[in-house]
Amino acid sequence: MNRGLRLPVPSLTMRLFVSHVLVAVVGALVTFAVVRAAAPALFEERAAGPGNGRGRANGSGPLREVVSDAVTTALLLGVLAGVIAAAALGLLASRRLLRSLRSVRSGTRAIATGDYRHRIPVPPESELAAVAGDVNDLAVRLADTEARRARLLSEVAHEMRTPLTVIDGYAEGVLDGVFAPAELVRIEAEVGRLRRLADDLSTLSRAEEGRLDLQPVEVDLYGLVTQVAGRLRPQFDDAGLTVTVLPPSRPVVVWADADRITQVLTNLLGNALAATETGGVSIDVPAGRDVATVTVTDTGEGLEPDDVERIFERFYRVPSRRRQEHDPGSGIGLTISRGIARAHGGDLSAESPGRGHGSRFTLQLPTRNRHPAGD
């Protein structure tokens, strides 16, 4: 047997056409057999009924044959007409279905080549309409992902341009003798800024792709907040600000990666420090049943309504006089912090009464009851 010989596979149109014809033929044959077998017997039964005794003896036999032949001829004509009608309808139905399938196929090919603006017309068939809708939704999501990727590359290039320009300028000045070698310290600072940016981008990428390496354990949330606040307290003291941690009514234990949550808390307190000129920052850790929260409230510059959600966008910085005087950072700290919170099954949100009225950031984390050990 030649295994290399492959028989041609019938197209879907042909298979649909043949299936319609076979259904029609089988139905017609069954109808023909039943009627052909039952019609003569029913005729004799009716002919032999009350008052028809002499009719049976006087020629019901020839009449029976005549009726049988007429029924057979009519059935044959009916079968032929039924098969032809079924074949025609099957051909029309298969072509209509294949037209919709070709439309979906051409649309998916266009999307696969990168044409994310292409939309598949919704076919009349409900099943294919659902498939077309899913493919169109996929195109929208792919277009959004591609736009975010392009925007990220542009933003990264913009963020790297400033320190690279500074490094290039100081290096050229030192080589030309315009600057003293001591100015290399500035180059070192800019290199450190680039290194932090690279580390933050790596963390952001893992957070957005759901690939953060979390090592969750049982964490005393109040103790962790107190530890972070204590480490940053000297900076608050130098700025003439207070930092207060309000204790919960009972222990608050979460199932989380302590290092990652420390990173989030450090970012929140650092932002509050940079945005606050007078007053201070309070941190509340209320005892919750299913969700533990950490609320960081400052008396700083506050946020405009349009900035409340945008501050979690990559490289978005709220216009701020005080932030210009401090290290502006990479601009993705809050984006990373929200990604870390959501990777734990929680969230990070912000609210503010408006500019000049301070702001409040709320970190939500599931308690250990929702994340048992071994998850």
Image (tube, rainbow, N blue to C red):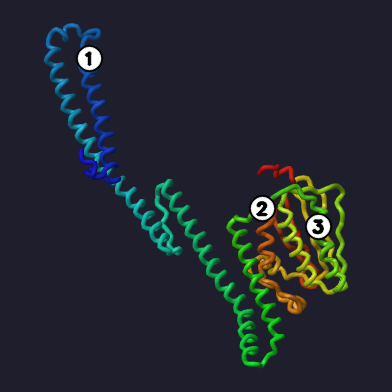
Residue 270 sits in quarter: bottom right
Q: Earlier in the sequence, mark 2 or mark 3?
A: 2
Residue at image location 78% in from the left, 68% down from the top: 272
Question: What number is the disc on residue 41?
Answer: 1
Q: Earlier in the sequence, mark 3 or mark 1?
A: 1
Query: What is the secondary structure assignment of the residue under circle 2?
Result: loop
* Residue 174, horizontal then vertical, whole percent: 65, 88
Is there CB contact under 8 Å for labels 2 and 3?
A: no
Residue at image location 68% in from the left, 60% down from the top: 338
Query: What is the secondary structure assignment of the residue under circle 1?
Result: helix
* Residue on which disc 3 sits: 225
Tell me which amino acid carries mark 2. Answer: Leu
Using the image, determine if residue 240 lies above or below residue 229: below
Q: Quadrant of the N terminus?
A: top left
Q: How many marks?
A: 3
Using the image, determine if residue 322 lies above or below residue 296: below
Residue 360 sits in quarter: bottom right
Residue at image location 50% in from the left, 63% down from the top: 143
Tell me which amino acid carries mark 1. Answer: Ala
Query: What is the secondary structure assignment of the residue under circle 3?
Result: helix
* Residue 170, horizontal then vertical, whole percent: 65, 86
Depth check, front residue: 371 or 191: 191
Q: Is residue 67 left or right of residue 168?
A: left
